[in-house]
Image (cartoon, rainbow, N blue to C red):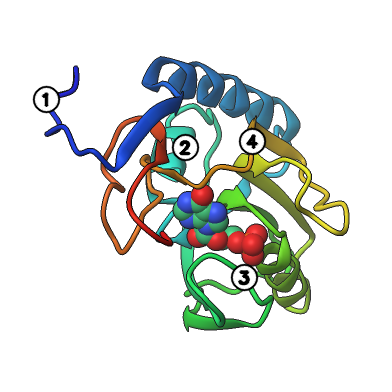
């Protein structure tokens, strides 16, 4: 067992961002968002499934009347390489026109999923769209992903935990760890 009582799994590698680091940084992000959105309550749009845990913790630190919506997307291509061709698996319930949208993402890798999502959301005539990403994998984006809020910049290793999965596992780990499993995640 690890200190949280999770069964030791050899695929769970080094801790990249600890639970304490996550919670401290998410508190800071929430405070920053609270300051920035004083006069325009944000609509938080979470990208399922990876962002669910981050969104829940982040929202607890935003001292404003926020609203929530979610969308689920799946990227065509292999499990590890995003093609940039994204399919909406679950669309938003709410109308975005005139809303201040804050898109909440788990990790920006190539940035292609985000590029698609931003265009898609902007086409719905919101008042603004900004992005809050928990993790930014450094050096992999061809274009500037233009992120207003970033939790942590991380090295290239594939990571799991705190919403992030391999084949739907490990999302419940309260920290981010590198993935040491066999083969391609
Ligand atoms: P992008 O389009 O290449 O930026 O891919 C972003 C998406 O790929 C994220 O929203 C995740 O769902 C997934 N992803 C990218 N890197 C990782 C990782 O290290 N662990 C788990 N999922 C990842
Ligand atoms: Mg995702």
**Do the residues under discs 2 and 1 have CB atoms within 8 angstroms?**
no
Q: Which residue is mark 3?
A: 82
Q: Which residue is mark 4?
A: 155
Residue 90, percent from left and from top: 44, 79
Q: Is residue 90 left or right of residue 75?
A: left
Mark nearer the N terminus (2 vs 1): 1
Mark nearer the N terminus (2 vs 3): 2
Determine the secondary structure under disc 2. helix
Residue 71, percent from left and from top: 49, 69
Q: Which residue is mark 1?
A: 1
What whole-number distance in Å separates the C-alpha atoms at marks 2 and 4? 26 Å
Mark 2 nearby-residue class (10 Å; few <14, some 14–19, many ≥20): many
What whole-number distance in Å separates the C-alpha atoms at marks 1 and 3? 33 Å
Q: Is residue 47 left or right of residue 117?
A: left
> Which residue is at a point 50% across and 16% down the rendered structure image?
24
Q: Nearer the viewer, mark 2 or mark 4?
A: 4
**Do the residues under discs 4 and 1 have CB atoms within 8 angstroms?**
no
Mark 4 nearby-residue class (10 Å; few <14, some 14–19, many ≥20): few
**Do the residues under discs 1 and 3 have CB atoms within 8 angstroms?**
no
Q: In front: 78, or 60?
A: 78
View extreme (right): residue: 143
> Which residue is at a point 31% across and 64% down the rendered structure image?
167
């Amino acid at each position: 067992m690890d200190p949280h009582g999770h069964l030791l799994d050899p695929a769970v590698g080094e801790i990249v961002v600890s639970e304490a680091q996550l919670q401290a940084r998410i508190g800071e992000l929430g405070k920053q968002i609270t300051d920035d959105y004083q006069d325009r309550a944000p609509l938080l749009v979470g990208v399922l499934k990876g962002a669910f845990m981050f969104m829940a913790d982040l929202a607890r630190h935003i001292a404003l009347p926020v609203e929530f919506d979610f969308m689920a997307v799946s990227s065509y291509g292999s499990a590890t390489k995003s093609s940039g061709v994204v399919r909406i698996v679950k669309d938003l319930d709410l109308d975005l026109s005139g809303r201040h949208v804050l898109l909440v993402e788990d990790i920006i890798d190539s940035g292609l999923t985000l590029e698609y999502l931003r265009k898609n959301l902007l086409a719905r005539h919101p008042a603004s769209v900004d992005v809050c990403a928990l993790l930014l994998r450094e050096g992999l984006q061809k274009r500037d992903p233009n992120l207003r809020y970033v939790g942590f910049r991380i090295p290239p290793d594939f990571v799991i935990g705190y919403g992030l999965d391999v084949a739907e596992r490990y999302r419940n780990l309260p920290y981010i760890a590198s993935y040491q499993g066999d083969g391609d995640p």
